[in-house]
Image (cartoon, rainbow, N blue to C red):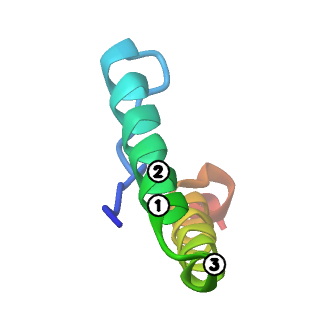
């Protein structure tokens, strides 16, 4: 699964938004193409990565 960083993400940049959406779709496709018994671990890893990225890019946490 490709790791995508959202730290410098600019939601007003349609190219960045498109790239991020495509990377997420690719990661989901990769997980869904895995054998059933491996999917839960893939979804867990993706959720953990997204959680870390959200925490890292959260302006409220940076101000604390």
* Residue at the (36%, 55%) spot, across then down: 5
The percent position of residue 7, horizontal first and vertical second, equals 40, 52
Where residue 37 sits, quadrant-wise, is: bottom right
Q: Measure the C-alpha gap from mark 2 to mark 3.
A: 15 Å
The residue carrying mark 2 is 29
Residue 19 lies, with reference to residue 2, above or below; the image says: above
* Residue at the (51%, 70%) spot, across then down: 49
Residue 37 lies, with reference to residue 50, above or below; the image says: below
Q: Are marks 2 and 1 in contact (CB under 8 Å)?
A: yes
The residue carrying mark 3 is 44
Q: Measure the C-alpha gap from mark 3 to mark 1.
A: 15 Å
Q: Measure the C-alpha gap from mark 2 to mark 1.
A: 6 Å
Disc 2 is placed on an element classified as helix
Image quadrant for the C terminus? bottom right
The percent position of residue 41, horizontal first and vertical second, equals 59, 84
Image quadrant for the N terminus? bottom left
**Mark 2 or mark 3, whichever is nearer to me:** 2
Disc sitting over residue 33 in the figure: 1
Q: Nearer the viewer, residue 64 or 27?
A: 27
Is residue 40 left or right of 12 when viewed as pictured?
right
The percent position of residue 3, horizontal first and vertical second, equals 34, 63
Is residue 18 left or right of 25 when viewed as pictured?
left
Q: Within 10 angstroms of label 3, few (less than 14), some, or many (20 or more) residues?
A: few
Is residue 29 left or right of 55 when viewed as pictured?
left
Q: Earlier in the sequence, mark 2 or mark 3?
A: 2
């Amino acid at each position: 699964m490709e790791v995508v960083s959202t730290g410098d993400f600019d939601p007003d940049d349609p190219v960045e938004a498109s790239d991020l959406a495509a990377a997420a779709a690719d990661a989901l496709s990769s997980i869904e193409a895995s054998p059933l018994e491996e999917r839960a671990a893939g979804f867990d890893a993706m959720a953990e990565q997204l959680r870390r990225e959200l925490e890292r890019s959260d302006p409220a946490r940076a101000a604390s």
